[in-house]
């Protein structure tokens, strides 16, 4: 499945919608979207991942990259991730650095 990413910023909230398979071949596309957000006054990064069917370690690295580049004050929300994505986050311990939600609370 092809990978697509769309982002927007509204009221200091960056929403990034990811669809398809996030692997080493598509991670650079996600990284480019994150780089567009650097320097913006963002308080929350909302990753809509309900249609993300697969995330390899390269995708996890991009979420870590986002956390590093956007700063520790930015909260990262993963909205409706698939079970295998939650499993990956748990195995790596990064689950403690993000908020897993069914719906973005704001």
Image (cartoon, rainbow, N blue to C red):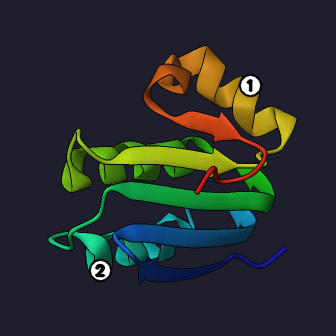
Q: Percent from the top left, x then y, of residue 19?
A: 74, 71
User: What is the C-alpha distance between the residues marked 1 and 2?
Assistant: 28 Å
* Residue 94 located left or right of residue 50: left
What residue is rendered at 71% in x and 58% in y? 49
In the rendering, which numbered label is found on residue 87?
1
Occupied quadrant, residue 26: bottom right
Residue under the point 62% across and 16% down: 91
Q: Position of residue 72 (x, y in %)?
A: 23, 38
Q: Secondary structure at mark 2?
A: helix
Which is more toward the observer, 78 or 3?
78
Q: Give the label on residue 60, or none.
A: none
Whether 95 is drawn above or below 14: the answer is: above
Picture quarter containing residue 34? bottom left
Mark 1 / mark 2, whichever is N-terminal: 2
Q: Secondary structure at mark 1?
A: helix
* Residue 3, image x, y percentages: 70, 76
Horizontally, is 66 left or right of 101 in the view?
left
Quarter of the picture containing the C terminus is bottom right
Are the residues flagged by discs 1 and 2 in contact, CB closer than 8 Å?
no
Q: Is residue 55 left or right of residue 14?
A: right
Instruction: Give the quarter of the image for residue 100.
Output: top right
Q: Which residue is mark 2?
A: 36
Q: Residue at x 77, y 52 (%)?
A: 54
Rate crowding at label 1 as few (under 14), some (14 to 19) or many (20 or more) other CA atoms within 10 Å: few
Counting labels gives 2
95 to 4, vertically: above or below? above
Quadrant in which the N terminus is drawn: bottom right
Asked whether, in this view, residue 36 is left or right of residue 10, the answer is left
Q: In this rendering, is residue 62 above or below 25?
A: above
Q: Residue at x 57, y 68 (%)?
A: 25
Report x, y in % for residue 4: 67, 80
Categorize mark 2 by other alpha carbons within 10 Å: few (<14), some (14-19), many (20+): few
């Amino acid at each position: 499945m092809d990978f697509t990413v769309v982002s927007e910023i509204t009221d200091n909230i960056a929403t990034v919608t990811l669809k398809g398979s996030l692997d080493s071949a598509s991670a650079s596309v996600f990284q480019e979207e994150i780089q567009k957000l650097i320097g913006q006054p963002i308080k929350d990064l909302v990753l809509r991942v309900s249609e993300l069917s697969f995330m390899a370690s390269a995708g996890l690295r991009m979420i870590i990259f986002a956390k590093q580049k956007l700063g520790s004050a930015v909260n990262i929300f993963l909205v409706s991730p698939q079970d295998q994505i939650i499993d990956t986050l748990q195995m790596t311990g990064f689950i403690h650095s993000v908020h897993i939600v069914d719906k973005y609370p704001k």
